[in-house]
Amino acid sequence: METSKRESITIEASVKAPAETVWSAWIEPKHITQWCSASDDWHAPYAENDLRPSGRFKTTMAARDGSVQFDFSGQYTAVDELRHIAYTLDDGRTVDVRFDSNGDTTHIVQRFEAEEMNPIEMQRDGWQSILNNFKKYAESL
């Protein structure tokens, strides 16, 4: 049986906030619901997070007009506080997030395996938009 390797996509952002602030904004459900959307017509009405290896997470992402929603969920495979998070989505794709702190700036590099339904550029743009929303939110804290 032949298996195909999924394409890896990388997105990045430099957040003008210390690692502790960035980490809290990234992992705490009360914060996740404030930034986890790709555009103003979407939002994240619910989030739960058990941040530990084998712990699970779920964020409900929904159109503000109520027309559609889905759960973004999976299981953590690695956690190194303030530095690294890795997880496997429920569809089997992997995600790796690195946090590189330099004083009052934290650089985030996020790599994820592409899914097969949507074009690579669309996926990259969507995930980058969410990361940009995160940056804006974390810098406001």
Image (cartoon, grey):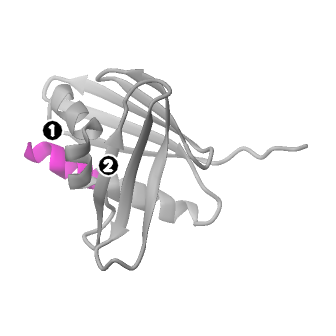
Near mark 2 (Cα within 10 A), the count class, few <14, some 14-19 or many ≥20, is many
Residue sitting nearer the eye, 66 or 39: 66
Pointers 2 and 1 in contact (CB under 8 A)?
no
Q: Who comes first in sequence, dot 2 or dot 1?
A: 1
Secondary structure type for disc 2: strand
- Please provide the residue range marked out in magenta: 132-141
Does the magenta segment cover residue 135? yes
- Residue at 34% x, 23% y is 83
Indicate the amino acid at tag 2: Ala
Q: Is residue 89 left or right of residue 24?
A: right
Please state the horizontal and vertical placement of residue 74, each as a whole percent of the image. 50, 42
Give the numbered dot on residue 16.
Answer: 1
Residue at mark 2: 47
Secondary structure type for disc 1: loop
Q: Nearer the viewer, residue 44 or 98?
A: 44
Foreground disc of the pair 2, 1? 2
Q: Which amino acid lies under the numbered mark 1 shown in the image of this protein?
A: Lys
Examine the structure image and report whether residue 10 is included in the region drawn in magenta: no
Residues under labels 2 and 1: Cα distance?
24 Å
| Quadrant of res 116 | bottom right
Q: Is residue 125 visible?
A: no
Chief SS of the magenta region:
helix
Residue 19 picture quarter: top left
Task: Count every numbered label the image shows and give the total.
Answer: 2
Quadrant in the picture for residue 15: top left
Quadrant assignment for the C terminus: top left
